[in-house]
Amino acid sequence: MRIASIYINGTRRFGRVEGATFTPIVHGQDPLDLLTAGAAGELEWGEPVPFDPNGVLEPPLPVTTIRDFITFEQHTAGSLRAVTGSTEVPEAWFEAPTFYFTNPYAAVGSGQGVIVPPGCEVYDFELEVAAVIGADGFNLTVEEAWDHIAGFTILNDWSARDLQQREMRVGLGPVKGKDTATTLGPTIVTPEELAEHFSDGHYDLQMQVFVNGTLIGGDSLANMAWTFAELVAYASRGTWVRRGDVLGSGTSGGGCLAEFWGWNGARDPAPITVGDTVTMTVQGLGTISNRIVAGPPLHPVPRARRVEWTRPLQG
């Protein structure tokens, strides 16, 4: 099944896509039930309408949380080169799949305009695939985790590189640099539709990203250093993953400009800007596309005030 969300007569609706037809669920039902085969079979359905995958869509389902990992070694090496000048991936990267939480309120759909974050002059995209959780789970094993993945969707992790580099020097990871937009879509595709591409825990899906129709780069999803089940198991370690949670694969090799900046030693290709259109295609999952639009004004926040302090005394 393919799950999507569109506006019908001005109201956001959730439902399934079959070919060029969208069938919404009846109002008052939980759209997250679409992620559960048993619950989906008990849903009431409305009247079908035409579905345009190139139109303006919403994220396929309500977003609860978004965890974004970093699992492609090539991307990691190139991005590190852009920051440190070295392509040596630290040993800590191999020990566990690192992730950060990003803003679920900033999720957008394909076809929607994406604003430039206030104060950003170096804007970038990140080509990813995300798994969507279909059943709550706590402290899952890798074997258990597969049963908690309901489907997959394309994810574009929009990145204000200048803001990101400044705030990461503080030591807390990306915050406002990743806070303005995350594209999800065009649909959520359930695993059985991707079975022919699945082998040894990985999905061999070809991924590509274009700017204004020009191919920038791409990769295979099979080059993830961990499987999605391993990501889910790690995310649930000592805590819960919940139905509707989104777990991003991290940027594919050749999936963002920052990686090329690292390899080329300069901002070549140039950062994206107002008027540019970024399009991402993943085999079996479809295509998402967004045009960059001007963002709101930057409202300044003052520098921190200096406060006298001393080292605390022990005992």
Image: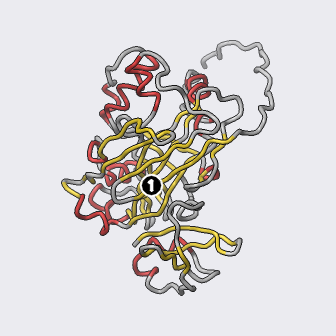
Q: Nearer the viewer, residue 56 or 311?
A: 56
Q: Nearer the viewer, residue 106 or 280?
A: 280
Give coordinates of residue 24: x percent, y percent: 55, 78
Q: Quadrant of the C terminus?
A: top right
Q: Nearer the viewer, residue 274 or 117?
A: 274
Give coordinates of residue 7: x percent, y percent: 64, 69
What residue appears at the point 67 percent right and 42 percent down from the top-left corner?
Answer: 293
Instruction: List the single residue furthest toward the left.
Output: 200
Give coordinates of residue 219: x percent, y percent: 32, 41
What residue appears at the point 57 percent right and 61 percent down from the top-left corner?
Answer: 55
What residue appears at the point 56 percent right and 28 percent down from the top-left corner?
Answer: 161
Q: Quadrant of residue 197?
A: bottom left
Q: Quadrant of the N terminus?
A: bottom left
- Asked if 205 appears above or below 276 in the picture, the reply is below
Give coordinates of residue 100: x percent, y percent: 50, 40
Packing grade of label 1 (10 A; few <14, some 14-19, many >=20) is many
Which residue has dot 1 on it? 287
What residue appears at the point 45 percent right and 41 percent down from the top-left corner?
Answer: 210
Q: Amino acid at mark 1?
A: Thr
Q: Quadrant of residue 287?
A: bottom left
